[in-house]
Image (tube, rainbow, N blue to C red):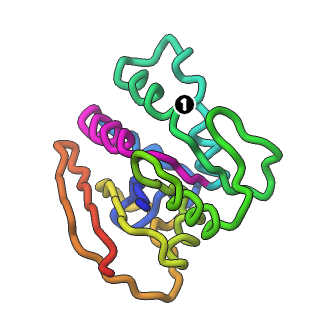
Amino acid sequence: MTYSMGVSIDGYIAGPDGGFDWTAPDEEVFRFVTDEIRQVGVHLLGRGLYETMLYWETADQDPSLDDSMREWAAIWKPIPKVVFSTTLPAVQGNARLASGSLAEEIERLRAEPAEGHIAIGGAALAAEAAALGLIDEYRARVYPVLVGGGIPFFAQRGRRVDLELAETRTFSSRVVYLRYRVAR
């Protein structure tokens, strides 16, 4: 399972005010993220990220969208999604509410034959998966900004995890991509 998000140099996916406008990708980074999402077979989301990503369920109807954003929407929309929430009564699009615990859902998904990998998004949900030792890869797009606080990319769970660097890339916008595998 992979955890991939944009992150500030000081380790946050959103600032103290909840904003993450500094993660708006330029064309080069957006192409990269689009290629990355092509590899996803199922995406696990917490409520917050699910609600943020709802836009993409109908984005193809937005006449102001450029071709690259239409392509993203066309890839994102059909991906099966599992949403973890105790407050949402229902979800939209190709999504379902999780019926079991995170560990149970991941075990079920890993047992099913599927193309693509399992991706997880949302800091709280990823922190839970990390605490359970369920994340295989961390993929961070590090933005050259210090936000001073907010929602951390890596929640502190008091457990050491050794990582092996698998890939790096520096974009012309000074965003740095880091892909680490969990050393097992």
Span shown in magenta: 27-45
Decide if residue 101 is on the left or right side of residue 8.
Answer: right
Q: Residue at x 45, y 63 (%)?
A: 12
Closer to the camera in the image, 151 or 57: 57
Question: Measured from the top left, where is residue 52 in percent x and y?
Answer: 59, 42
Q: Residue at x 32, y 54 (%)?
A: 141
Instruction: Indicate yes or no whether the magenta region holds residue 32.
Output: yes
Question: Measured from the top left, where is residue 10 in percent x and y?
Answer: 38, 68
Question: Measured from the top left, where is residue 91 in percent x and y?
Answer: 72, 40
Q: Residue at x 41, y 25 (%)?
A: 69
Instruction: Indicate yes or no whether the magenta region holds residue 53.
Output: no
Q: Residue at x 41, y 30 (%)?
A: 72
Image quadrant for the N terminus? bottom left
Disc 1, SS = helix
Position of 121 relative to 79 (above/below): below
Question: Within 10 angstroms of label 1, few (less than 14), some, or many (20 or more) residues?
Answer: some
Image quadrant for the C terminus? bottom left
